[in-house]
Amino acid sequence: MPDLLTMIGNSFALLSSRTRARLSCLVQPGLMILGDLSIQGNIKSVKSLSEPLQVGMDNGARRALIPLENKRRVIVEAKFMRPTDAPKDMIEQIAEDASLYLVLGSKYDSLIPFIWDDSRRTEHHGEMVRGLRQISGVKDAVIVSRPGSMKMD
């Protein structure tokens, strides 16, 4: 039997959906809500953003509501990897961007790259994530491949 805090934390999405129903607001399809609701009603931050975001994107999520505590110091950088782009070049681009975003005195202290792989080169994703994690300030990376049934222009 789960304890009260677990039940409250797991019911945040239910609470959100009921509130939207009462206000006659539609819940957007593909919306993912992260965080736990404390007994005082505060939304607690998530220890890791990359794993839940990766799982959500793999399962059709298009948007995510992230607790403010996670959002304040983290920047999510979106990149589009074309079939002509080399994985090494993508890592170098993100390293250059991280050196600009994460300077001393910046309002950000960490970066999570989000890469849309238009060429579906999943065999390189593990290597890219390992390379990105070595960049100072990069907490983790999310790489999503273009679905197989989606046609290229």
Image (tube, rainbow, N blue to C red):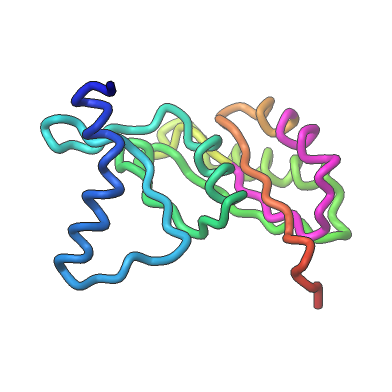
Q: Quadrant of the N terminus?
A: top left
Q: Is residue 147 above or below residue 24?
A: above
Looking at the picture, tell me which residue is in the foreground, 12 or 89.
12
Residue at the extreme bottom: 153
Q: x, y percentage for residue 81? A: 76, 56
Q: Is residue 147 magenta?
A: no
Q: In the rendered view, does 109 fall on the left or right side of 119?
A: left
Q: Measuring from the top left, give residue 29's x and y in whole percent.
A: 44, 65
Residue at 26% x, 43% y: name it: 12
| Residue displayed at 85% across by 41% down | 123
Considering only vertical position in the picture, is 75 above or below 151?
above
Task: Report the front residue among 88 and 39.
Answer: 39
**Residue 3 position within the rendered picture, expressed as x and y whole percent measured from the top left:** 23, 21
Which segment is the magenta one? 113-130
- Left or right of 85? Residue 27 is left
Q: Quadrant of residue 23?
A: bottom left
The residue positioned 18% from the left and 58% from the top of the image is: 19
Q: Quadrant of residue 136?
A: top right
- Asked whether 76 or 6 is in front, the reply is 6
